[in-house]
Image (cartoon, rainbow, N blue to C red):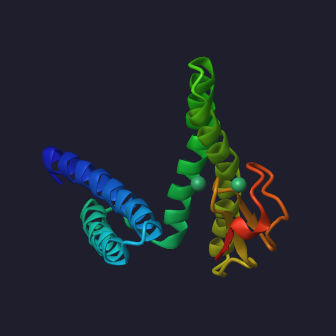
Amino acid sequence: MRKMTEKNLNEAFAGESQAHMRYLIFGDVAEKAGYKNIARLFRAISYAEQVHATNHYRTLGMIKDTEDNLQVAIDGETYEVEEMYPVFNEVAKFQGEKGAEMSTHAALEAEKIHAELYRKAKESVKNKKDLDIGDIYICSVCGYTTVGEAPEKCPVCGAPKSAFKKF
Ligand SMILES: [Fe+2]
Ligand SMILES: [Fe+2]
């Protein structure tokens, strides 16, 4: 692919990805405020942005088989754990930004677990097997991730068991 087109598609992928996420968040806000149809509109258009992002990503040749995709996921999570979030967290502390300090700390803790789970998944795929994993629970407050059963209290943010979403 020509360089300029590649750069444009990467920018479009980033923009559509952010719009997808932004609209999901806005949809939840609208839902809570009682605007059911506006929530539905946000979610529908969020899905359209996901389709656009997927098409750009595919055109860039970034969608591979699951083993390769897991390696991309491992690399991303590892970068977040080893470089990005520790540095972001220090900067937040240095600048006295309490909210950012908390959100980067919570993300760092979860990404460690994500990297590990993806590593296990890749091992399984190498042996041509699906991952042997039980229920996956995500804290809806901070994103803490655990497998098997939800804890009584989130170890990262203290949210109760009822705040966990099962996958
Ligand atoms: Fe993650
Ligand atoms: Fe939490």
Residue at coordinates 56% horizontally, 30% vertically from top-left?
A: 88
Q: Quadrant of residue 136?
A: bottom right
Q: Position of residue 147 (x, y in %)?
A: 76, 69
Q: Position of residue 69 (x, y in %)?
A: 49, 64
Q: Position of residue 50 (x, y in %)?
A: 32, 68
Asked if residue 25 is positioned above or below residue 99 in the image, the reply reads below
Asked if residue 57 lies left or right of residue 102, the reply is left
- Res. 34 visible in picture: yes
Asked if residue 79 lies left or right of residue 23, the reply is right
Of 117 and 127, nearer the camera is 117
Asked if residue 95 is positioned above or below residue 82 in the image, the reply reads above
Q: Position of residue 122 (x, y in %)?
A: 63, 66
Asked if residue 91 lies left or right of residue 153, the reply is left
Q: Quadrant of residue 35?
A: bottom left
Q: Quadrant of residue 28?
A: bottom left
Q: Quadrant of ligand 1?
A: bottom right
Residue at coordinates 32% horizontally, 73% vertically from top-left?
A: 47
Asked if residue 51 lies left or right of residue 164, the reply is left
Quadrant containing the N terminus is bottom left
The residue sitting at the top extreme is 94
Residue at coordinates 78% horizontally, 62% vertically from top-left?
A: 160
- Res. 123 visible in picture: no
Residue at coordinates 60% horizontally, 21% vertically from top-left?
A: 96
Of 57 and 87, nearer the camera is 87
Quadrant containing the C terminus is bottom right
